[in-house]
């Protein structure tokens, strides 16, 4: 195989803020390209400051291991993931980008989209989850403005402020669409016990990561009393976390970048369903490349958050259709091989 990689930086339409005041105006990502003859596979790993993940660091590590990666014979993507997992044992984001590219390349070689390779059916007759649109934390007036500017069937609202209930109350005055909230571990147990009943009265559908990732005592109390389904995000990163979270949450949010790629995500979904957990797959603000990988899991998911491309001002690939005209949030089936999208360079709107 031949390995190429580069940094990508795409601006957000609005500054993107989550709990604890973490704001970004652009999304930096690593894009990797694996090629074998005329076949090409792409993968992506976003840089995330609060996980200490930088594109520069990932590129330096890739360069050091370039020869070993290029010598690998890609006859089985799962075998490739195990090789990468041992090559970069502390770098799940980097492993994810390569695992994603490996699956894309393998799909090109086999002339199959990934969802077919994973023995799932996805066509216009199959009901798949509707993608939400995320509203980052801002002033209440600004959040209402964002929502009104982007009609969408489901909104996910970032919370973790002193005015969460006031914010949600005002948003509810402007839409009858389903609302979900994501606290990004920003609440205390006491706050969550007060806020969740109020959110339930406002018709909120679910709550994502209400407490700190290791506040298990608080989560036990919250699960017993919560009027809404609780989904783990920061508490559920790797495969080993799924069984633990089954005791404390009603569902899990799998992030490809955090768990180290599509290969372990497939195993996590299987275990979660065995344990009776609902399954969401979430975004780390990936561009079209990373979002297409999420889309390939749609026939296996209960919920999906893959709105990175619709939060940004540029698209780096074509083929992923969010039904912009209908504003219905449905993702059209991807029938091209691999990830099902085609990279474009230079990319633009």
Image (spheres, rainbow, N blue to C red):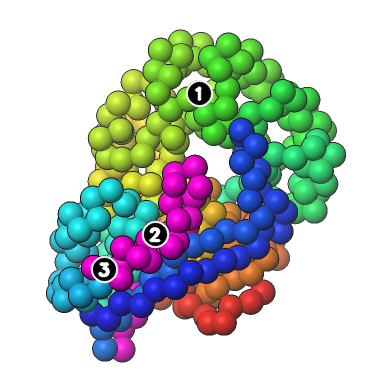
* Residue 89 horizontal side relative to residue 140, left or right: left
Q: Quadrant of residue 18?
A: top right
Q: Point out the tag, 2 or 3, that comes first from the N-terminus.
A: 2
Which comes before the other along the chain, label 1 or label 3?
A: 3
Q: Residue at x 20, y 75 (%)?
A: 67
Mark 3: secondary structure: helix
Question: Relative to residue 142, is residue 96 drawn left or right?
Answer: left
Residue at mark 3: 64
- Mark in front: 2 vs 1: 2
Residue at horizontal 18 percent and vertical 71 percent from the top: 68
Q: CA distance from mark 1 to mark 3?
A: 39 Å
Q: Is residue 25 above or below residue 211?
A: below
For residue 335, which numbered disc appears in the image?
Answer: none
Instruction: Report which quarter residue 176 is drawn in.
Output: top right
The alpha-carbon separation of the residues under discs 2 and 1 comes to 30 Å
Residue under numbered circle 1: 211
Dot 2, crowdedness within 10 Å: few (<14), some or many (≥20)?
A: few
- Comparing 276 with 194, the one in front is 194
Residue 64 in view:
yes
What span is colored magenta in the figure? 38-65
Q: Residue at x 37, y 54 (%)?
A: 93
Q: Give the mark, 2 or 1, whose residue is nearer the N terminus.
A: 2
Q: Which mark is residue 57?
A: 2
Percent position (x, y) of residue 46?
A: 47, 57
């Amino acid at each position: 195989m031949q390995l190429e990689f580069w940094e990508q930086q795409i601006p957000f339409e609005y500054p993107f803020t989550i709990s604890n005041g973490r704001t970004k105006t652009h999304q930096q990502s690593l894009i990797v390209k694996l090629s074998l003859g005329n076949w090409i596979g792409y993968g992506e790993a976003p840089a995330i400051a609060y996980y200490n993940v930088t594109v520069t660091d990932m590129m330096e590590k890739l360069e050091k291991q370039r020869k070993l990666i290029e010598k690998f014979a890609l006859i089985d993507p799962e075998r490739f993931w195990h090789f990468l997992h041992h090559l970069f044992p502390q770098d799940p984001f980097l492993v994810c980008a390569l695992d994603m590219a490996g699956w894309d390349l393998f799909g090109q070689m086999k002339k199959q989209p990934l969802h077919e390779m994973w023995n799932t059916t996805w066509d216009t007759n199959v009901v798949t989850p509707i993608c939400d649109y995320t509203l980052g934390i801002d002033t209440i007036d600004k959040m209402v403005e964002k929502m009104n500017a982007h009609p969408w069937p489901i909104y996910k609202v970032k919370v973790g402020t002193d005015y969460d209930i006031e914010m949600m109350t005002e948003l509810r005055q402007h839409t009858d669409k389903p609302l979900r909230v994501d606290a990004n571990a920003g609440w205390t147990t006491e706050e969550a016990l007060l806020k969740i009943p109020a959110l339930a009265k406002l018709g909120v559908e679910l709550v994502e990561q209400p407490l700190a990732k290791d506040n298990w005592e608080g989560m036990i109390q919250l699960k017993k009393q919560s009027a809404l389904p609780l989904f783990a995000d920061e508490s559920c990163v790797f495969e080993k976390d799924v069984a633990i979270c089954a005791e404390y949450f009603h569902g899990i949010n799998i992030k490809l970048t955090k768990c180290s790629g599509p290969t372990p995500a497939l195993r996590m979904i299987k275990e979660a369903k065995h344990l009776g957990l609902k399954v969401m797959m979430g975004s780390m603000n990936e561009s079209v490349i990373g979002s297409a990988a999420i889309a390939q899991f749609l026939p296996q998911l209960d919920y999906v958050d893959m709105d990175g491309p619709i939060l940004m001002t540029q698209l780096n690939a074509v083929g992923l259709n969010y039904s912009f005209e209908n504003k219905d949030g449905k993702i059209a089936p991807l029938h091209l091989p691999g990830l099902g999208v085609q990279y474009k360079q230079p990319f633009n709107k």
